[in-house]
Amino acid sequence: MPRILGGEVLSRRPKITRAVPVGSIVRCADNTGAKQLKIIQVVGYKGRLKRRPAACVGDHLKVTVYVGPYKLRKKVLDAVLVRQKFPIRRPDGTRVMFEDNAAVLITPEGNPMGTEIKGPVAAEAADLWSRIANMASLII
């Protein structure tokens, strides 16, 4: 049920299966130099006691650079998940799945750290993060 705020209808975020748990290694989809990222936290996750937090497309993450340049390694950075292997079910009934799990590094303000994004970006992530949508070459 959509909420109404001051005559404006606010739609809910679509329910997407959280398929990338904390501790996963994901590919870095931008040109910052990082190759692989390790997820250490899902920002805003509220879940069951003792259940490992997991992320879905469009989620804000805290990550560390697992493989990449020395200047980026061993630091806690922000990222947004832009692709996941597990199928995403859209409201029209179609299912979309990608070849890999991938994230884009962002600054604490929400701006992308790189200047280009490699590969496609899920439409669910592009709707939530407009600056990532502007940089994406392909939105699926």
Image (cartoon, rainbow, N blue to C red):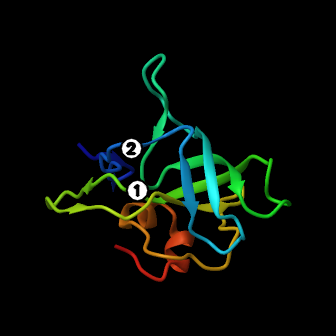
Taking depth in this image into account, of 23 and 49 the one nearest to the observer is 23
Residue 83 place in picture, x, y as percent: 43, 61
- Which of the numbered marks, if any, corresponds to residue 84? 1
**Quadrant location of the N terminus?**
top left
Which amino acid does the dot numbered 2 rest on? Ala
Query: Dot 1: what SS?
Result: loop
Q: In this view, does 79 lie to the left or right of 46?
A: right
Q: Residue at x 46, y 55 (%)?
A: 58
Q: Residue at x 67, y 79 (%)?
A: 115
Judging by the rendered image, the residue that carries numbered circle 2 is 19
User: Sequence order check: which comes first, mark 2 or mark 1?
Assistant: 2
Which amino acid does the dot numbered 1 rest on? Gln
Q: How crowded is mark 2: few (under 14 residues within 10 Å), some or many (20 or more)?
A: some
Mark 2–mark 1 contact, CB under 8 Å?
A: yes
Taking depth in this image into account, of 42 and 30 the one nearest to the observer is 30
Q: Which residue is drawn at 46% across and 38% down?
A: 54
Query: Dot 2: what SS?
Result: loop
For the residues labelled 2 and 1, the Cα–Cα distance comes to: 7 Å
Q: Is residue 37 left or right of residue 15?
A: right
Residue 88 place in picture, x, y as percent: 28, 55
Q: Residue at x 57, y 39 (%)?
A: 23
